[in-house]
Amino acid sequence: MAVLSTSLITVAEYLRFLGEPSDITSERRGQLEQAIDWASDQVEDYVGRTFMSGSSATEIFDGLGEPHPELLHDRYTTTNAPLITSPSPKLYVRSSSQTWSAIAQTKYTYDATDGEIWFTDAGYFISGRKNYRVVYDYGYASTSTIPKALKRATALLVKLGETQSSSIGVVSTASADGKNKTYSSTMPPSITDILDVYVR
């Protein structure tokens, strides 16, 4: 058995975090692999997004137009990041006849790290209801590229979960879409303070 490809840290990284030697028994390794898989799932449930590459997303959103001369809706931040640069994210606009048309990629650019997309030609998202769509691939290529803070939060949760796994994580949802969650108080601020940065 090995950690899942979607897990956020490796067994070796976790052992270094603990300061433990790497020559552990196969039984101990198996236990850690399960704990890491569990903790990685808990982290992604908390922030409401996935992190490893191989995922695709489509988001439809409202254009806000120009609600104020100094407040132009010319950029959008995707729910997931980092963005995969090949293929690059694609923007579409919906017409009054409900037809989607691709926006020329020369008219916008993006920050792959943060997932922010913006117009480069003084354009902006015209006011409308669900009139824009972005299609993109995202995720970190390997655990070696995952931010250290995110790894630390996962490692802390693994350590905590080895003794309290039954009482940590999502215990209820506050909305039908599942986005507003209530978490067990046993997930301490030392973990949630790190993860809150990644909540979208």
Image (tube, grey):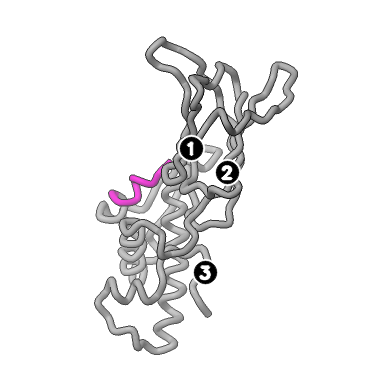
- Which dot, 2 or 3, sits closer to the camera? 2
Circles 1, 2 touching at the beta carbon (< 8 Å) = yes
Amino acid type at mark 3: Leu
Is the residue marked by circle 1 packed among few (<14), some (14-19), or many (20+) residues within 10 Å? Answer: some
Residue stretch rendered in magenta on the structure: 193-200
Is the residue marked by circle 2 packed among few (<14), some (14-19), or many (20+) residues within 10 Å? Answer: some
**Residue that mark 1 sits on:** 110
Count up the numbered dots: 3
In the figure, 107 relative to 12: above or below? above
Percent of width and height locating residue 169: 41, 56
Between 56 and 74, the one lying in front of the other is 74
Circles 1, 3 touching at the beta carbon (< 8 Å) = no
Q: Earlier in the sequence, mark 1 or mark 2?
A: 2
Q: CA distance from mark 2 to mark 3?
A: 27 Å
Q: Which mark is residue 88?
A: 2
Q: Quadrant of residue 39?
A: bottom left
Percent of width and height locating residue 115: 46, 41
Q: Quadrant of the C terminus?
A: top left
The residue located at (42%, 42%) in the rendering is: 114
**Residue that mark 3 sits on:** 4
| 198 drawn magenta | yes
Between 29 and 86, the one lying in front of the other is 86
In the figure, 70 relative to 103: above or below? above
Amino acid type at mark 1: Tyr
In the figure, 71 relative to 200: above or below? above
